[in-house]
Amino acid sequence: MNTTGGGAAAAGPRRGQPRDAAAAAALATYDRRARIPIILSAVLPLIVVPEQGNWIAILINVVSWLVFVADFFVHQRLFVNYLGTRLGRFDLAIVLLTAPWFLLSGAQGGGIVVVLRLARLGRLLIATKGVRHLFARLGRVAIVAGAVLLVGAAMAFYAERPVNPEFATFGDAVWWAVVTLTTVGYGDIVPITTAGRVDGAAIMIMGVALLGLLAGSLASFFGLEPKSSGAEPEPPHDPVLAELAQLRAEVKELAGLRDQLAVLTRQLAAGDKRAPDPGPE
């Protein structure tokens, strides 16, 4: 029997990993349910600044801080020595530094508080896989959209400027490209040349495609995509689940060896019963 592999499999999860399979399952459920509250708690305090007498803004900032406090304690409970990891210490620093100190008399946060609250967005990008994936996809969409805007605006500007006074500056061309790409179509600036209209049609088609990509990314992030029932489940990539699968395989192997040993024992017992007794000399 391979005792080395068994000893490695029997070792507990390392620091920063779920404590066991139940903790990993609970963490997956928590991440799915807490995704939107954590995003709102990271974004709203940047928009709604607490002011004296504005109890709604104060309540929003306090509740958002409590969400991050709860998130820290959930991770501390489900992970092995979460506070000993860099992410755990980063979470603790965010919780302490972004506490509602403004409730204290004379405490003023100033610009440093805004910077610290921006760190919450950084925490989302670092720790949340779904948010990282969403921002990665949105980043690619933004790059393509920016390229379409600049190229389309430049083509329309050089095609329309000599004959169309509505394209007086490059800024007017960019504004027209934005309105066309987003399929809003205000109609305040309209191309009149063939090249300008072809350019506008291309921007419209790209706008519809980019909006579809954006909608698909948001649907995937919020779990609105239909799940195919016939697809095979992917094998778990979590180290704890992999170790548990290895333990199950070894237990199954031990059970097979036990059954073989039981069969051999019965065969030996049957052989002893069939052996003739030696007669008296």
Image (cartoon, rainbow, N blue to C red):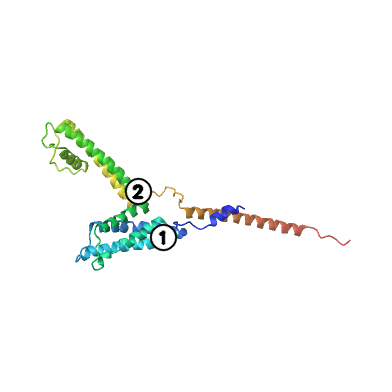
Q: Residue furthest left?
A: 165
As drawn, the label of residue 160 is none
Of the 4 image quadrants, the one containing the C terminus is bottom right
Q: Quadrant of residue 177?
A: top left
The answer to whether 204 is drawn above or below residue 96 in the figure is: above
As drawn, the label of residue 133 is 2
Q: CA distance from mark 1 to mark 2?
A: 25 Å
Secondary element under disc 1, as helix, strand or loop, is helix
Considering depth in this image, is 103 or 182 the residue closer to the camera?
Answer: 103
Q: How many marks?
A: 2
Q: Position of residue 222 (x, y in %)?
A: 32, 53
Q: Is residue 15 left or right of residue 160?
A: right
Q: In the image, what residue type sits under mark 2? A: His
Considering depth in this image, is 27 or 76 the residue closer to the camera?
Answer: 76
Q: Position of residue 267 (x, y in %)?
A: 70, 56
Q: Position of residue 20 (x, y in %)?
A: 47, 59
Q: In the image, what residue type sits under mark 1? A: Leu
Q: Is residue 95 left or right of residue 273?
A: left
Q: Residue at x 51, y 54 (%)?
A: 243
Asked if residue 265 shows in the view, the reply is yes
Q: Position of residue 61 (x, y in %)?
A: 26, 62
Q: Residue furthest bottom?
A: 105
Q: Residue at x 15, y 31 (%)?
A: 193
Considering depth in this image, is 110 or 21 the residue closer to the camera?
Answer: 110
Considering depth in this image, is 27 or 77 the residue closer to the camera?
Answer: 77
Crowd rating for badge 1 (residues with CA inside 10 Å; few <14, some 14–19, many 20+): some
Asked if residue 44 shows in the view, the reply is no
Crowd rating for badge 2 (residues with CA inside 10 Å; few <14, some 14–19, many 20+): some
* Residue beneath disc 1: 83
Q: Are marks 1 and 2 in contact (CB under 8 Å)?
A: no
